[in-house]
Image: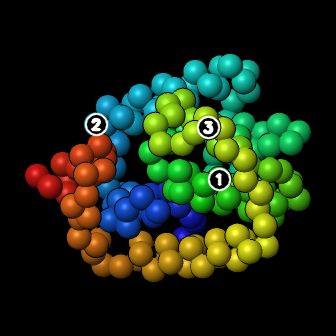
Amino acid sequence: MKVTGTMINYFFHCHRQCWLFSNKFNMEDNSENVRIGKILHEIEERKARKGEVSIESVKVDKITEQFLVEFKKSDADVNAAKWQLLYYLKVLKSKGINRRGKLMFAEKNKQTHKVIVYDLSVELEKELESVLQQIEVCVTKDVPELPLKDKKCKKCAYFDYCYI
């Protein structure tokens, strides 16, 4: 199974969402929040004057001499975005490309900064290996977990699938 950055992000956000996405239940095309995120991503891409870079199963928003940069619509789930970025850093490292990670948010709601910088330490890399194993267990189950019934579910692209 090839893990993607989206799978990592969804795993931290909601195991059910990760399972649905990984098992080809695509509800994102109907989501206004996803469309807005894609537009903001395109705007940032134009500003950077460089397109996405695809390496194995990941699409990196931007690579500079120092950083791998990941753009996000908002800082609503920084932990999920952080692990997605760390996964990208690990994939790059496996190709002999060492960078620091930079998360950039178009909307700042919960954090005090619009930019957060991360380094892939040995400890984080070990923790990431554990996360990858947990994702494999999650997505290979016969059925997804039950819905979270959390207020964040209302903005999820899978809301209709889970609750209607």
The quadrant of the picture occupied by the N terminus is bottom right
User: Up-down: is 138 above or below 86?
Assistant: below
Colour scheme: rainbow
Judged by depth in the image, the label closer to the viewer, 1 or 3, is 3
Is label 1 in a helix, a strand or a loop?
A: helix
What's the amino acid at mark 2? Asn
Q: Nearer the viewer, residue 110 or 124?
A: 110
| Above or below 161: residue 103 | above
Q: In the image, what residue type sits under mark 3?
A: His
Picture coordinates of residue 97, whole percent (x, y): 86, 54
Kindly report which numbered mark, 2 or 1, lies closer to the viewer in this rendering.
1
Mark 1 or mark 3: whose residue is earlier in sequence: 1
Residue for point 80% across, 43% down: 67
Q: Amino acid at mark 1?
A: Leu
Residue placed at 65% from the left, 75% from the top?
Answer: 127
Q: Distance from label 1 to label 3 (Cα)? A: 17 Å
Residue most extreme to the front: 112
Taking 146 as reference, is 50 left or right? right
Q: Which residue is mark 3?
A: 113
Q: Is residue 56 visible?
A: no
Q: Is residue 80 above or below residue 129?
A: above
User: Which badge, 2 or 3, is on the more N-terminal residue?
Assistant: 2
Image quadrant assignment for residue 163: bottom left
Could you say where residue 69 lies in the image, as x and y percent from the top left? 70, 40
> Is residue 142 something that shows in the picture?
yes
Residue 51 position in % (x across, y down): 69, 30
Q: Which residue is mark 1?
A: 85
Label annotation for residue 9: none
In the image, what residue occupies the spot 58% across and 73% down? 132
Task: Say which mark, if any, is on residue 30.
Answer: 2
- Element at badge 2? helix
Judge from the rendering whether residue 160 lies leftward or rightward of residue 140; answer left or right. Answer: left
